[in-house]
Image (tube, rainbow, N blue to C red):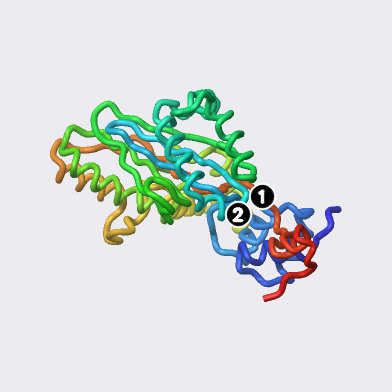
Amino acid sequence: MAEITAALVRDLREKTGVGMMDCKAALAATNGDMEAAVDWLRAKGLAKAAKKSTRVAAEGLVGVLTRGTTGALVEVNSETDFVARNEKFQAMVAEISKLAVDADGSTEKLKTMKFPGSGHDVAAYVAEMVATIGENMTVRRTAALSVKDGVVASYVHNQAAPGMGKIGVLVALEGAGSKDELNAFGRMLAMHIAATNPVSLDLASVPADVLAREKAILEEKNAGKPANVMEKIIASGLKSYAKENCLLEQAYVHDGSKTVAQAISEAGNKAGGGVVLKAFNRMQLGEGIDKGSDDFAAEVAKMSGQGCLRD
């Protein structure tokens, strides 16, 4: 039996908004498994449906660069936000972003590409910067999108410098219409994606394990219902899930009276020649990295030999 610590209970409470005692019961019932505990609470009707989320626990920047029909994202991590604001670090991220456009979404390929103005590849240059700045850094991941005819538009949220920030989004729009119109709409759509963090384009492209999880929760919440009734409940539940989590079904944040699919159709008519959303990619700094919950002030105090720091 896993130990149910106060920290675990607190994390679950912050994640779901459910009372401490219910959170403790959920963790006890799921042997301390955080995600299973969220499902347990949802099945009991104690937590509202919410997308799976991960704590953003790493610092650094997400670089974004588009070049006509191609675009790329790259996440370069650092230990602290102090380094993320460093001009040398930002200049390095800007150069790596330019290279990422030609890396075709391969992180390994990107790391082996020659860093401009140096005799090193990207991996070696980053290692050199670690020695110069005095903090660990890494090129964690990259992604790329392209279209044959159209645009790859972008948006950067919490921008720290041109083309880099905390969240980067790419939107690939295929269409023969006005590129200026497509770029303008693409940026608006990328802003929508940054805000709503959709799971997929539509219900058909939601990962099978995610759909299975949603169905299991619906079945547990409605246990004992006749098979024909259960089938309708699941269909209705998945339809609601799609409206919240599938991009084309979501209400467009810039005009809640229409869905994203309707907004795309209107944008195609405005651009002339129609438009198809081929793909999107959203990259958030530190996504999926657990950096722990150390007391930074206490650690600085320990390193400086000053004991506890006080306000």
Residue 118: horizontal and vertical position, in percent? 49, 27
Q: Residues within 10 Å of mark 1 (few under 14, many from 20)?
A: few
Q: Quadrant of residue 257?
A: bottom left
Q: Which numbered circle lies on residue 290? A: 1
Locate the C terminus by quadrant: bottom right
* Vertical comparison of 136 with 46: above or below: above
Which tag, 2 or 1, sits closer to the chain's start? 2
Q: For the point 27% across and 60% down, which residue is it?
A: 255
Tag of residue 55: 2
Counting from the top left corner in percent of width and height, residue 115 is at: 48, 28
Disc 1 residue type (three-letter): Asp
> What is the CA distance from the residue labelled 2 to the residue labelled 1?
7 Å
Q: Residue at x 60, y 50 (%)?
A: 58
> What amino acid does circle 2 point to?
Arg
Check the image and report above or below for 99 versus 220: above
Report whether residue 226 is seen.
no
The residue nearer to you, when weighing 92 against 14, is 92
Helix, strand or loop for disc 1: loop
Residue 101 lies left or right of residue 295; in this view the side is left
